[in-house]
Image: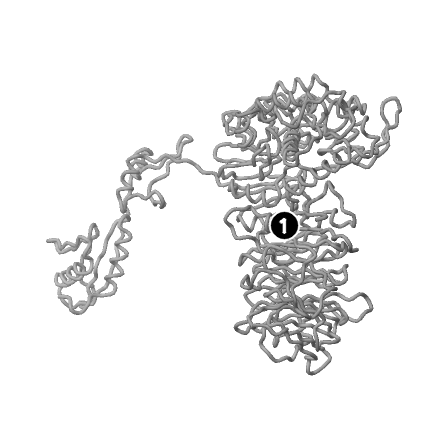
Amino acid sequence: YSDLHTFELQAPTRLIEWARGNRVCVAGYGQCDGNEILQLIPPPTLLTKETQGLCPERDFKVECGGFSERPVYSLKYVPDTSLLVTSGPPDSSLQVWQVSAEDSDVIKSVSTIATENVTGQSWAKIATISARAPWVLHGSRLDRVQITEVESRKNVYTAAIQGNEELGSLAFLDCNLLLLCCATGRLCLVDTRQPQSLVEAVPAPSAPCSEHWCMGTRHAAQGSEPSSQPVARLSSRGLLALTDLRKTSEFLALAKARVPSPGSGAEFLCVSWAPALEGYLAISGFDGTVHVYDTQSWDSSGKEAEPIFVHKGHIFGGAGGSRDPPLVTVHTWHLQKPRTLLSAASDGSLHVWDWVQPCGKC
Amino acid sequence: RRFPDFSYITQNGRLTDFLDCVIISHFHLDHCGALPYFSEMVGYDGPIYMTHPTKAICPILLEDYRKITVDKKGETNFFTSQMIKDCMKKVVAVHLHQTVQVDEELEIKAYYAGHVLGAAMFQIKVGCESVVYTGDYNMTPDRHLGAAWLDKCRPDLLITESTYATTIRDSKRCRERDFLKKVHETVERGGKVLIPVFALGRAQELCILLETFWERMNLKAPIYFSTGLTEKANHYYKLFITWTNQKIRKTFVQRNMFEFKHIKAFDRAFADNPGPMVVFATPGMLHAGQSLQIFRKWAGNEKNMVIMPGYCVQGTVGHKILSGQRKLEMEGRQILEVKMQVEYMSFSAHADAKGIMQLIRQAEPRNVLLVHGEAKKMEFLKQKIEQEFHVSCFMPANGETTTILTNPCIPVDISLGLLKRETAIGAAPDAKRPRLMHGTLLMKDNSFRLVSPEQALKELGLAEHQLRFTCRVHIQDPRKEHETVLRVYNHLKGVLKDYSVQHLPDGSITVESILIQATAHSEDQGTKVLLVSWTYQDEELGSYLTSLLKKGLPQGTP
């Protein structure tokens, strides 16, 4: 480690979202009522590029908070607005909130975006963009994907796709191109300008169907093609498939992470690309660790890959004793500091860590 | 403004007459720094309560504070050493959990607050109304102090500080690890580490930390503790051993906790020794004495490090270097260039949001008042407290008055006769379930008593009146009156099996003490009029009977 800071939240979170001004947002998912949404200001040490040691301000500060009546499974800020959107069980509706850090430190519930209630639906996955207007892309199933304008709650687009597969995650590539990842591993590229919606479907690598998949996308730099960035898919068995959207007939790379055998559940599977390091990604959700990989050396053989670094802090942090070892629920990369990550676990811990690059690399 | 504006307390009259007492929670300057000013310069001669350790340590800190402000900064209009002494004469020391009767109405009790040696939270009680004021406290124990604790005292109001309420703290382990890393790095490169400390508190914590680290890492560099420090520290800790946490108390008995293997007494001459070392020296703000001397010797070497332990009063060298100043003017116009590394560590112990919620959960107050926070930044915490505990939460500004309604319990004596009589009715008394009793409340001569109505009437010399109700029920029955009566009697006997139903020789029916008589209707021979009569006491049965009879007699009744 180059640096490691451990914090304890009052309630565990399964999301860490970055907001304007280097704020970080976390939210509770445990109880049926009284879950807190907290927007935090990280300590100054984490905002500057250089690492300081004994800085007086080493703590996270709660800038504002809100109370959610349902568990918060997913949260996304709506760019260029002071709004954020959350989703969670028991249905696929969305809740819209207003963050007004100026005159009050309460995140107020503003409205609800209702969706058709179909039995067997789980919670909605969400993504936001502010292109022509603040939009939220949401859906819990492949055939229920739609785009809603956040402020007016009007439906802007409904994807016409067949199939009732559950969705793992979704993303805006730009305001016309959507990327959907099904829990089965199938990746769907949707163009909102086309009547047929579905442009392409990329199957998962052949595997026993009990696997559950999620995806991670990387934001393209200003001006470059959104589909130039590889998409990573992670399965509950530890399989990592990288795909170039411009050439979907083959896998860019395929590898296997050394993770505990399946059965730990796919609840918290998470894969994300490093914003500042080319080709680096991190995975978590199998146990109390976060793995960092350099994918630049990978091929399509699907053999086991060696992680560059494994963060084990969450295993050792706990109060100890007979409780189950904590499970990492989510991780995210720091937007500016290249080797800094934040990770949270089911015991309420929140870690901020920075690993040392092994010798021989940049 | 150096001192608080005490005219907020009262504009008219002397403080001594207005106040019943003054309570000091702990020896930190932001809590007791204005005490001599308040008692000797503004004027207050009543009692001042604080715990024993606070009483012992306060004057030392106050004298230090006075010295810096007057001697170093040349302030006038400040309290003198004599004033500090006079002020402390007014102090009454209290023990933990000891109920102190301030006057016939007011009592106070101190609770353990953690935070620093001798820090206490105070419960203030008048009759059955109480307020708990927390002062500064923390809910997580550290190496030498335990965590704050309150019993389920259910105060009407809990006043808690909320400075760290919006903070999610870095774990202690990380902070300690960073501290040890810095010390280790400095020592490894041959540098010297100066840690200016106050005699008590953090110094012990850090000594224990370093000792353990040195042992584990098998380090050889010497660690020194300036002699004045050891003596004082030992002296106070022995005196106040009950104030430290369990672990220290246990080990103190076996060996002197403050006799360390790797930490030795310091001698002035050692400061000139070559090679690495770590030195704990007083005073904590580098404003005078040994720590300043050592600082001057070591400041010029960039291999060395000074770690400031906490808040430094303005004007001290400590404050200056923490603000970034690297060229200091010493006596005789000498300029000291500070090349050594300056670090700051905050090991201060305050409660965060989780801790505050914990304390509220322990004490179960009916209302909570938050102090020491920005109004617009406390809305979230206020809602959190209100939602979780269903109590009102207030956050008044300076000078604002908050009114809190309490539900005082008024004790009432119940006469033994009444108690016996009421408990004899119905089921046996159950300790867990409230029991409804009937009686008369007599308020006479400042006393409240519950007595039986008869007793009350007697005492008050009032005559008892009887209320009797009579109700007419019409029944269709062409037969003679005495036959109707027989029918009614048989009907009631059959329905009211648990009651005493009697047919009297004079033709009337009684159900318990209720009387039923029948007469013929004046105009209609086919209708009989039943007169049902009962006293107020039998209201329930009377109404029941009436509605029963109004339903009419079933056909087959003989």
How many numbered circles are shown? 1
Residue at the left extreme of this rendering: B505
Compared with residue B469, is residue A204 higher up or lower down, i.e. above or below? Answer: below
Residue labelled with disc 1: A313
Answer left or right for B250 relative to B492.
right
Q: Is residue A110 visible?
A: no
**Quadrant where the C terminus of chain B is found in the figure:** bottom left
> Residue placed at 58% from the left, 39% from the top?
B140
Q: Residues within 10 Å of mark 1 (few under 14, many from 20)?
A: many
Q: Quadrant of the N terminus of chain B?
A: top right
Check disc 1 and give the amino acid type.
Gly
Farthest bottom residue in view: A195
Give percent across and percent down for residue A180: 66, 72
**B383 w.r.t. B525: above or below:** above
Q: Position of residue A289 (x, y in %)?
A: 62, 55
In the rendered image, residue B161, in percent from the top left (x then y), is placed at: 62, 39
Vertical position of residue B519 compared to residue B262: above or below:
below
- Percent across and percent down for residue B449 are 37, 35
Relative depth, front residue between A261 and B139: A261
Q: Nearer the viewer, residue B446 or B496?
A: B496
Q: Is residue B311 visible?
A: yes
Taking the image as shown, residue B492 lies to the left or right of residue A152, namely left
Q: Quadrant for residue A94, please give it.
A: bottom right
A116 or A312, nearer to the observer: A312
Front residue of A70 and A309? A309
Q: Secondary structure at mark 1?
A: helix
